[in-house]
Image (spheres, rainbow, N blue to C red):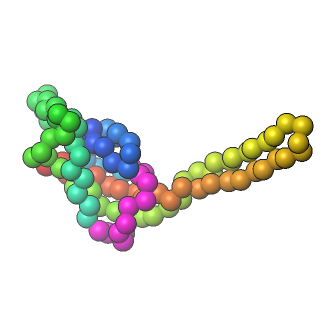
Amino acid sequence: MSYAIIEASGRQLWVQPGHFYDLNHICGDPGDIVHLNRVLFYCKNQAIQIGQPCLNNIYVKTKILKHLRGRKVTVFKMKSKKNVRIKNGHRQNMTRLLVEKIF
């Protein structure tokens, strides 16, 4: 069993081959191959490699499955005693990536 901890879209993720993950929007069409090279930690068959901060010779091969939108977040601002109430919503554009292999 191999896994890696990568940095992508401003977050750190624990990824494994064969699983899919939702990240902030990545430019590309569904079916495109994306290589993520900011690998912080890699483990394969109990052999551990730790980057300082990243590993130079290891990258993650992923495939864009689809583009979607995240859950709706409600933003409510209010000023007391002024009768000011503002309600807004936000949905983040996301990309679903399938991890094919960790090299």
Q: Is residue 100 visible?
A: no
Q: Residue, x 37% and y 66% (percent of image)?
A: 27
Q: Is residue 6 visible?
A: yes
Quadrant location of the N terminus in the rendered image: top left
**Residue 78 place in picture, x, y as percent:** 79, 42
> Is 23 inside the magenta-drawn segment?
yes
Q: Is residue 43 above or below residue 20?
A: above
Q: Residue, x 34% and y 62% (percent of image)?
A: 64
Say whether residue 82 is left or right of residue 55. Answer: right
Find residue 42 and report its image quarter.
Answer: top left
**Residue 56 place in picture, x, y as percent:** 12, 45
Q: Residue, x 68% and y 53% (percent of image)?
A: 89
Q: Is residue 53 above or below residue 37?
A: above
Say whether residue 90 is left or right of residue 13. Answer: right
> Is 100 inside the magenta-drawn segment?
no
Say whether residue 54 is left or right of residue 29. Answer: left
Q: In this orientation, which residue lies closer to the viewer: 42 or 26? A: 26
Q: Residue, x 68% and y 47% (percent of image)?
A: 74
Find residue 97 and report its image quarter.
Answer: bottom left
**Which residues fall within the magenta stretch?**
21-32
**Residue 15 place in picture, x, y as percent:** 30, 42
**Residue 53 place in picture, x, y as percent:** 20, 36
Q: In this orientation, which residue lies closer to the viewer: 8 or 103? A: 8
Number of numbered discs overlaid on the protein picture:
0
Task: Single out the residue that lies furthest toward the bottom.
Answer: 29
Say whether residue 80 is left or right of residue 75. Answer: right
Q: Main secondary structure of the magenta part?
A: loop
